[in-house]
Image (cartoon, helix red, strand yellow):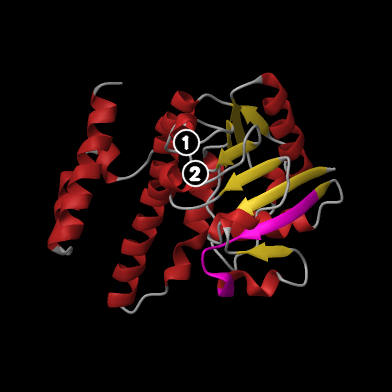
Amino acid sequence: MIKVTILGNGNLATHLTRVFLKKKKIDLVQVYSRNLEKIEYLSKKVSITNELLTLKDADIYIIAISDNSISEFSSQLNLKDKLVVHTSGSIPMNVLKGNFSQGVFYPLQTFTKGKKIKFKSIPICIEATNKKHLNLLEKLAREISYDVRPITSDEREKLHIAAVFVNNFVNHMYHIANNICHENTLPFDILFPLIKETARKIESISPINAQTGPAKRNDSKTIEKHLDQLNSDQKEIYKTITNSITNSFTTT
């Protein structure tokens, strides 16, 4: 049985809490939040607290808070010789400050409260300062996922940049497309099959070979027609991406 404490109440913390509570080989000892009201709903399932001095004994303490707060927050922990990990993709392991062993437990996925997700297929990237704790993190990760990968801080930082492109930036493109549809009284869901096929296609062929559209063809008349119908912000994005696509095929 692996004893775990979660420090945080955000999107990822909420999902980790939910999945850990379901696993027989994981003992979720406690959940911490500065605002106790936000985790009050857990009080009948697990110990909750808003006081760091009342943290119970655990094998792993998982910090799942905003990246900017991790260093300062970790410096307040008095967990000598314990394993404390953060869940960020963008910051190094050594941002953790305290008299404890450092580690990283990074599920590579987008999380939203209220949106259920299956952990089994989510890659979990782990890192630790010693083999003993790396093995412990791997054991924990394999309880919830089939895909566990030891990855260094430098590798994880690069991976996170790639993740921003395929997730955050792509989702913003969905937002722009949704606005265009809404402004022209068109149903956004008509694009769903196209979105799904685009994602499916790159599972079998490379993105460069999957590329289609006016930018690849350098179809200047269509591009100009599109630009004439967009607002100033949309035009800048359209031009930047179009140039990037065109340049990709000029240099390949």
Amino acid type, label 1 = Lys
On the image, the x and y values in percent for residue 64 come to 54, 50
Residue 36 is inside the magenta segment:
yes
Residue 54 left/right relative to 201: right
- For label 1, the SS is loop
Residue at the farthest bottom position: 185
Which of the labelled discs sits on residue 97, or is there none?
1
Which residue does the image show at 64% across and 44% down from the upper left?
61
Element marked by disc 2: helix
> Which residues are the magenta region?
27-37
Q: Amino acid at mark 2?
A: Ser
Quick check: 68 left or right of 115?
left
Query: In this view of the protein, can residue 218 be seen by the observer?
Result: yes
Q: Quadrant of the N terminus?
A: top right
Image quadrant assignment for residue 142: top right
The span from disc 2 to disc 1 (Cα, nearest Å) is 6 Å
Q: Nearer the viewer, residue 172 or 228?
A: 172
Q: Quadrant of residue 187?
A: bottom left
Which residue was labeled with disc 2?
Answer: 74
Question: Where 163 falls versus 169 (above or below)?
Answer: above
Q: Position of residue 65 (x, y in %)?
A: 49, 53
Residue occupying image coordinates x 68% and y 50%: 5
Residue 219 image position (x, y, % from top left): 21, 43
